Amino acid sequence: PDHISLTNDDDIMNLVLWIETNKVRHYPTTAQREELRDKGEWKSRISGYLKELKCPYGFEKFRPAALDWLCSHAVRLEYAAKQDQMSVVAPNPQGGGGGGNCAPVDVNSIQF
């Protein structure tokens, strides 16, 4: 979807399940992941899941913060898994030293 509503339980449940299945992979089996989809107890299951991941925010009281933390956690894990690929600096197409995308900066310039 192009957006997720923090007030829509189905959106949140699907987001958490997608993040777990595709990025975090804390639970080793599909059956364990599917338990997060249990509509009868999904809030307590997601709360438990976040505690297992050591999320510093309680899901019931701080839902937006907990979901933000989960997304950030997933990004950290993805980066850690691909750190070697992501930390390679591309050569500067304009030449010059380093591989950054910045033009040289004149620190004595009035614009600086």
Image (cartoon, rainbow, N blue to C red):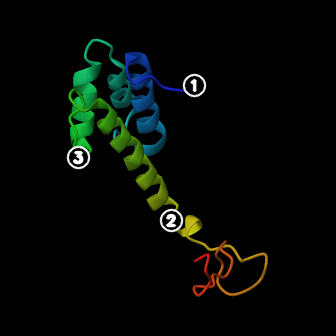
Eyeballing the image, is 46 above or below 102? Answer: above
Q: CA distance from mark 2 to mark 1?
A: 28 Å
| Residue picked out by circle 1 | 1
Query: Disc 2 vs disc 1: which is toward the camera?
Result: 1
Quarter of the figure with the N terminus: top right
Task: Determine whether, in the image, residue 105 is placed left or right of residue 38.
Answer: right
Tell me the quarter of the picture where residue 62 sits.
top left
Residue depicted at 42% across the width and 55% down the height? 76
Amino acid type of the residue that numbered disc 2 sits on in the rendered structure: Gln
- Badge 2 or badge 1: first in the primary sequence: 1
Tell me the quarter of the picture where residue 95 sits.
bottom right
User: Which of 15/49 is in front?
Assistant: 15
- Badge 1 or badge 3: first in the primary sequence: 1
- Where is residue 109? Give x, y as percent: 62, 83
Is disc 1 placed on a helix, strand or loop? loop
| Residue picked out by circle 3 | 54
Residue depicted at 37% across the width and 20% down the height? 37
Amino acid type of the residue that numbered disc 3 sits on in the rendered structure: Lys
Residue depicted at 57% across the width and 65% down the height? 86
The label shown at residue 83 is 2
Amino acid type of the residue that numbered disc 1 sits on in the rendered structure: Pro
